[in-house]
Amino acid sequence: MSQQPQTINVNDLDVAQLADIKKQLEDELNHLTSSFAQLKQAQAKFKGCIDNINAIKPQNKDKVILVPLTNSLYVPGKLSDVEHVVVDVGTGYFVKKTRPQAAKYYSQKVDYIKTNLETLEDTIGKKRENLNYLVTVLQAKFQAQTQTTKS
């Protein structure tokens, strides 16, 4: 049996409870924003891969290029096969693909991330709206408290 989520009117909560919910919403918003930035970085990386694949031209065969071993270490190498590339498909696995196959693979990754970014952007927007509403209610409660203490 699944339970339906309960809805609570934030106007019925006291200031301490509202402050707790505000903190929780802020934490969620920070996490979502961080995730959004990471997805943007991943998307840029995949777009860079597409650019690198497109930079491999048949006229560059047997030319000396710099091959990355790490993010900061490159060694000279000779481009012997301009028709195939090695694609990192995750968790330490690499697959040999033709340039068009590799470009398609990375394009699909970019599109998948784009869809996730759009969904995440909507979620972030809704969380911001909820936070703004909660702050408004919290401010109204503070004003009401100060009015009653002055009286």
Image (cartoon, grey):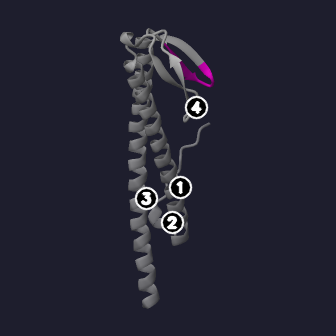
> Which numbered disc flags the more N-terminal residue, 2 or 4?
2
Task: Say which amino acid is labelled 2.
Answer: Leu
Residue 132: quadrant of the picture: bottom left
Task: Say which amino acid is labelled 1.
Answer: Asp
Q: Which residue is mark 2?
A: 18
Q: Is residue 81 above or below residue 116?
A: above
Is 34 included in the stretch rendered in magenta? no
Q: In front: mark 2 or mark 4?
A: 4
Residue at mark 3 to residue at mark 2: CA–CA distance: 10 Å
Residue 17: quadrant of the picture: bottom right
Q: Which residue is mark 4?
A: 70
> Which numbered disc flags the more N-terminal residue, 1 or 2?
2
> Which numbered disc flags the more N-terminal residue, 3 or 2?
2
Residue at mark 1 to residue at mark 3: CA–CA distance: 11 Å
The location of residue 134, given as percent across then percent down, is 43, 62
Task: Tell me the residue at 58%/31% (across/down).
Answer: 70
Q: Which residues are magenta?
A: 85-93
Q: Helix or strand or loop: what does disc 1 sit on?
A: helix
The location of residue 118, given as percent across then percent down, is 38, 37
Few, some or many residues within 10 Å of mark 2 (<14, 14–19, 20+): some
- State the predominant SS element of the stretch in magenta: strand
Q: Which residue is mark 3?
A: 131
Q: Nearer the viewer, residue 79 or 82?
A: 79
Q: Which residue is mark 1?
A: 27
Is 88 included in the stretch rendered in magenta? yes
The location of residue 9, given as percent across then percent down, is 46, 60
Q: Is residue 144 above or below residue 50?
A: below
Q: Helix or strand or loop: what does disc 2 sit on?
A: helix
Q: In front: mark 1 or mark 3?
A: 1
